[in-house]
Image: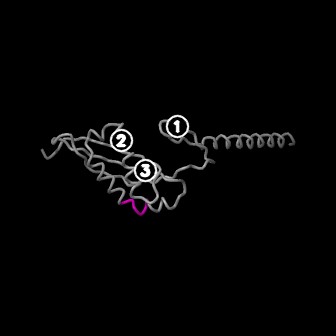
Amino acid sequence: MIKKKALFLALCGILVFSASFNCSDNEKKRDFLRDSGNKMKVVKKSEKPNLSYHLLDELSFTAIPPDEHSIVFVTIRVSLAYPYNNYDHENEILVKRYRINKFIRDYISEKTYGELNEGYKRKEIEGELKSQINSMMKYPISHLYFSKFSVLKRPNPNL
């Protein structure tokens, strides 16, 4: 009987030890990757992020086609970054989000298919959008990202 109790206690000790070891492994797995430009950086859960993000509505519209025989469809979604837990920034973005969406739609719809389809021009567009959005904001945004950027050229069905 004593051997059974000793064996049972030993097994319980092993289970408790392995469970605590697995918890520390799971904490390591909870660390997540954050994209900082072209490099991926491991950010621990205990670290406070520097920025908060506001994801604007998805916008779909047409842009200037390369010729009269085609139509260019654009679908984008923009994310605005501002200092972490700054409620003034957050409130201003919420109040002005429709104006910002309209500005983004108007600005990008004036671009040609070639300008939108080139990867290096997207960075220029991001920079121009950021500076124009900051000019209409009391509290400027830190970064502007395209979380979705799709440009499709299709034949014009009306011709």
Count of marks overlaid on the render: 3
The percent coordinates of residue 136 (x first, y second) are 39, 58
- In the rendered image, the quadrant that contains the N terminus is top right
Residue annotated with mark 2: 122
Are discs 3 and 2 less than 8 Å apart at CB?
A: no
> Which quarter of the picture shows residue 31?
top right
Q: Of helix, strand and loop, which one carries label 2?
A: helix
Q: Report the Cα–Cα distance between label 1 and label 3.
A: 19 Å
Which of marks 3 and 1 precedes in the sequence?
A: 1
What amino acid is labelled 3 in the image? Ser
Separation (CA) of disc 3 from disc 2: 14 Å
Depth-wise, is mark 3 or mark 2 nearer the camera? 2
Measured as percent of width and height from the top left, residue 65 is found at 21, 43
Q: Is residue 38 above or below residue 139?
A: above
Of circles 2 and 1, the one toward us is 2
Magenta-colored stretch includes residue 97: yes
Question: Which residue is denoted by mark 1 in the rendering?
Answer: 40
Image position of 20 (left or right of 85): right
Label number found at residue 144: none
Please name whichever residue, 8 or 44, is drawn nearer the observer in this view of the structure. 44
Which mark, residue 79? Answer: 3
First to last magenta residue range: 93-98
As drawn, the residue found furthest toward the left would be: 159
- In the image shown, does 73 or 88 lie closer to the viewer? 88
